[in-house]
Amino acid sequence: MSGDGRAAVAAAIILAAFGLAAYFMPTVMVAVGNRSTFAAGALAVLFVAAFFLVFFLRARSQNRRK
């Protein structure tokens, strides 16, 4: 498989994992929000930040290989 194919597969896996997590996010946030609304909000912020952080780190790793 070429380098572009591997990058596409990796991106698809990452998107699928985050998509699955996003599907369950409302249920998790309600459960966490019953204990602390601050924690539920922080969880949402961390989820969004993690999404961008994973792709930032992957791009950075790919640039070092070239």
Image: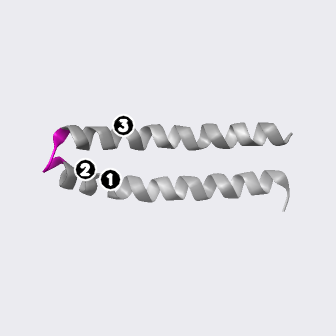
Pointer 3: what residue? 45
66 within the magenta span: no
CA–CA distance in space, label 2 to label 1:
6 Å
**Number of the label disc, if any, that sits on residue 46:** none
The magenta region covers 33-37
- Neighbor class of circle 3 (other Cα within 10 Å; few <14, some 14-19, many 20+) is few
For the residue marked with disc 1, what is the amino acid?
Met
The residue shown at (84%, 62%) is 1
Observer-nearest of 16 and 63: 63
State left or right for residue 44 relative to residue 14: left
- Residue 57, by quadrant, is top right
- Residue 40, given in percent of the width and then of the height, sits at 24, 44
The residue shown at (46%, 55%) is 19
Q: Is residue 9 above or below residue 51?
A: below
Residue found farthest to the bottom: 1
Pointer 2: what residue? 29
- Residue 50, given in percent of the width and then of the height, sits at 48, 42
For the residue marked with disc 2, what is the amino acid?
Met
Q: In this view, does 3 lie above or below 45?
A: below
- Residue 52, given in percent of the width and then of the height, sits at 53, 38
- Neighbor class of circle 2 (other Cα within 10 Å; few <14, some 14-19, many 20+) is some
Quadrant where the C terminus lies?
top right
For the residue marked with disc 3, what is the amino acid?
Val
